[in-house]
Image (tube, coloured by chain):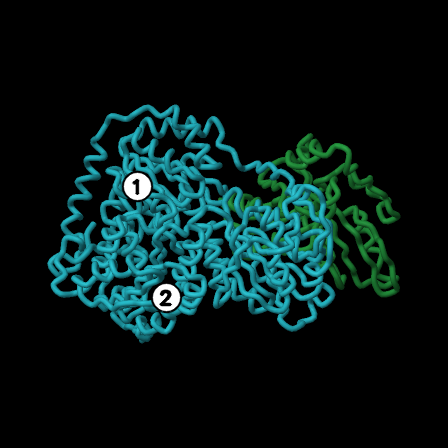
Chain colours: A green, B cyan
Amino acid sequence: MLHTFVALVDDKPGVLTRVASLFRRLNINIISLTVGHSERSEVSRMTIVAEAAPGSGHRIKASLFKLESVLDVDDIGQLSCVTRELALIKVAATPHTRAPIFQLAEIFRARVVDLAPESLMLEITGVASKIEGLIQVLSEGDNQILEISRTGRMVMRRGQHTSRVLDAMRVASPEEEPIIPITATAGDVGLELLAGDPNHPL
Amino acid sequence: MSDKPASAASQPTRLTGSEIVWATLEGEGVREVFGYPGGQILPIYDALRKYPIRHILVRHEQGAAHMADGYARASGKVGVAVATSGPGATNLVTGIATAMMDSIPMVCITGQIPTKLLGTDAFQEVDITGITLPITKHNYIVTRTQDIAPVLREAFLIASSGRPGPVLVDITKDAQQGSADFDFAAAAPSPHRPHPMLSAEHDAITAALDLILSAKRPIILAGHGVLESNATDQVLTLAERLNIPVASTLLGLGGFPASHELSLGMMGMHGEAWVNQAIQQSDLLIACGMRFDDRVTGVLASYAPNAKKIHIEIDPAEVNKNVKVDVALIGDLREILETVLPHIVPRKDTTWIRAVNILKGDAAVRDIKNLPDLGHLYAAHVIHDLWRATDGKAIVVTDVGQHQMWEAQYYKHESPRTLITSGGLGTMGFALPAAIGAKIACPDREVWVIAGDGGFQMTASELSTIVQEKLDIRIAVINNGFLGMVRQWQEFIYERNYACSPILSPDFVKIADAHGIPGATVRKRGEVLPAVQAARSAMGPFLINFMVEKEDAVYPMIAPGSALDEMIRRPSNGHDAKEK
C-alpha cells in the first residue's frame, strides 16, 4: 500500500541523500518525493510517498526519526488532509488541432501555460487521480503527449494541526524566523479558481 | 608538552583548526585516541604535541576503530579513532559498522583533501561521509575552521546519547590549517531536540504492570541496553522482587551476575537448552534493552508462542520490528525501571522458578564441564579453566566464531563490561585490537583475548602495537585448524563438505616470540592451568596457543529455520540427540 510521510528536515547539503538512503536500505520504493521550504527557514519540508507493506508505517517513521537531520515526521495514513500535485503536460498540437485540447483543459480546470506552433503545455493541479484522468483522456484522443512532468504529492493536514517540534523550536527562539511570505508570480494567476474544489473528479 | 594553550577555557582563544580538534577532545574528557597518520591529517598530528592526549599508533586503521570500540565498551566513555583520508578512512569502515551494529559510542576523525579539490579525484580522496552514511549514527564533513569545535561537540553528544553509535567527522586539510576563535563552552551543542516518540506513557506503564501482575511464568530478557543505561541494579531488583529468571543476550552478558540463582545465561542460537526452553514456556517476556535479533529468536512464527511481551527499549524503530509486542515502553531503561519498580509487589510464587531449575538440572548431565576429556583438549574445558583461574574477574575480549560461543557459555561474567565481543556484525579480527582499547581504558584490569586461529590472523599485526605501547594483555588462541563455525555449519547443513574452512596457521608462539612476547603451546588439559598461570605471572603480554580438538562443535545449536526449543543438543554417550 501507499504510505505518505511528511518529514521536516534540516535544510543542509546531504539531507536528501540520508532520507532517500533510508528507503533504499529498507528496500522500499519511493513513489514520489517533494521537497521545498517550510514555514521556518533552515527547515525543509518533504512529502514522501512510498509503496510498502501495510504494517510498516511505524518502522519507517521511527527510522526516519533516527536520522539526526530529521526534526519531525508525520505518518499521514488515513488522516484528513489536503493532497495536491502539480503536473505540466506538453502535447503536440497545431493551430488546427488545438481546440479539443482547450476544451479538455477547461473541463479539467487545467491551464494552457505555453503555446507554440507545434505544441502546447498544460498546467494542472489536483489530486493524482485528476491528473491521471487528464493524461488518460489526452492519450485516448489523437493527441501525442510529448512530455509529462509531475511534482509528486504534497500533503498538509486539515485543521489546526502544526508540528509540535517546530512549535517547540519557535518557543525556544521567538525572535527569529518570521513566516516566509508567499509572493505570487504571474504564473499563479487563476490559483483561486482551483481552491474551492479539491476533489473535483474531472 | 611545553607551550600548552588554554584549551577548555571560557575565553575565546585564537587557534588553528588542528589545535581546535585536540582542544575540543581534551574538553570532552578524551585522554587517549587510536590512530594512524597520513598526508591529509598531518596538521592535526603536528598539533598533538601541545595537548595531554595519548596517541596509540595502530598497525591498520581497522585496528584503530576496534580499539576505540573496545575502549568504549570497557569504559562506557566515547572512544576516538583518527585516520587520514582515502585508504585510512576506508580502513575504518569495518570497525565503524561493528560499532554501529552494537550501539557503541565512538567518534572517528578523518582528514580530507582541501575543500577546493573536493570531487576532483585528488590523491587519497574518498567520499567517506557517503561511504559511512548507512553505518554511522551521523556523520559530518567540516570545511570551515570555525565549525570544527561545534561539530565535534555535537558528535560526542550524538555518539553517547539515546541509543549510542559511531559518528564520523571528516575535516578538510584547509579547515585544519585555518585559524578561528576557540571557545569550548560556546561550542556546546544546543539542547537535544524533543523526540516525540520517546515516551513511556502512563497508560503503557499501567498496562505493563497489569501484565506483570497476572503472569505466571514471566522471564526477563536482559540485553545490551542494561549495560548502556547502567540499569544492572534495577534489573537485579526487578528479578529478585518478582523471583523470576533472567536470560541474557550475548551483549547482555555481565548485565546480570552469572552466579545469581536467577541467572539462566545466554539465550538464542547457542544458548543452553534450559534458557530457550524457559523462554518458549514463558507467559510473559520482559525484554529490557534488547532487539529480538534473529540469533535470539529462532523462527519468529513459533517464538515464545504463549507469552505476552513487554518491550522496554530506547529506539522506537526496534519496537515491533521482529517480534510483535503487547506493551512498548520507549525510553531509557534505567529511568523506566525506576518508575516501574515502586509499583512492583514482591512475588511469592516459586512454581515457575522451580520448574526452570528442573530444566537446568536435566541439561547439566550433558554439560561438557562434567564430561571427561579422555586425553582430548576441548575448547570448552580451556575456557572453563580460564574462568576458574581468573576468578571470573578478567575482562575477556573475544573474536567471532566457536570460541566466542564457548566463552559466552563457560566464562561466567559477574559484572558489566567484562565481556567485549562483536555481536551484531560478527567481525572476525575484532578481539586483539578491541582488547588493546579495553586495556588502555582499564589499565588495572586483567585483560584476556580469546580468539580463534582464523580471526587472530586477520589483525595479528596489532601485536606490535601491544609491544610498542607496553600493554599487559594475555592472549589465548583457540587453535583447531579450521574456521570452526564455518566448519560446524558445513558439518550440520552442508553434508560435511568442508569447503575452504581448513586453515593453515603459522606457529603463533613463534609469531609472538618475533614480537618479543613470550608464549606457550598447550595440547593437553593438564597443561592448561600451568600455562594460564605463566601468562598471569608474566611481566607483560603473553600468548598461549591452545591446540584444541579439531572437529568439535558448539552445542546446543538451533539450526536455521528451527524453533527456539528445537535445538541440536550436546551429544550424550556419543550420539547426537535432536529433542523437542
Other residues around mark 2 within 10 Å, as few (<14) / some (14–19) / many (≥20) = many
| Badge 1 amino acid | Pro
Q: Position of residue B144 (x, y in %)?
A: 72, 56
In the displayed structure image, the side of residue B487 where residue B38 appears, left or right: right
Q: Quadrant of residue B270?
A: bottom left
- In depth, the one of B386 and B171 nearer the eye is B386
Kind of residue at badge 2: Gly
Could one spot residue B28 in this view of the protein?
yes
Q: Is residue A6 left or right of residue B495?
A: right
Please state the horizontal and vertical placement of residue B555, each as a whole percent of the image: 23, 56
CA distance separating discs 2 and 1: 29 Å
Is label 1 in a helix, a strand or a loop? Answer: loop
- Residue at 66 percent across and 36 percent down: it is A163
Give the residue furthest to the front.
Answer: B2
Judging by the rendered image, the residue that carries numbered circle 2 is B455
Question: Which quadrant of the figure contains the N terminus of chain B?
Answer: bottom right
Secondary element type, mark 2: helix
| Chain for numbered disc 2 | B
Q: Position of residue A169 (x, y in %)?
A: 68, 36
Q: Is residue A16 visible?
A: no
Q: Which residue is mark 1?
A: B257
Q: Nearer the viewer, residue B503 or A202?
A: B503
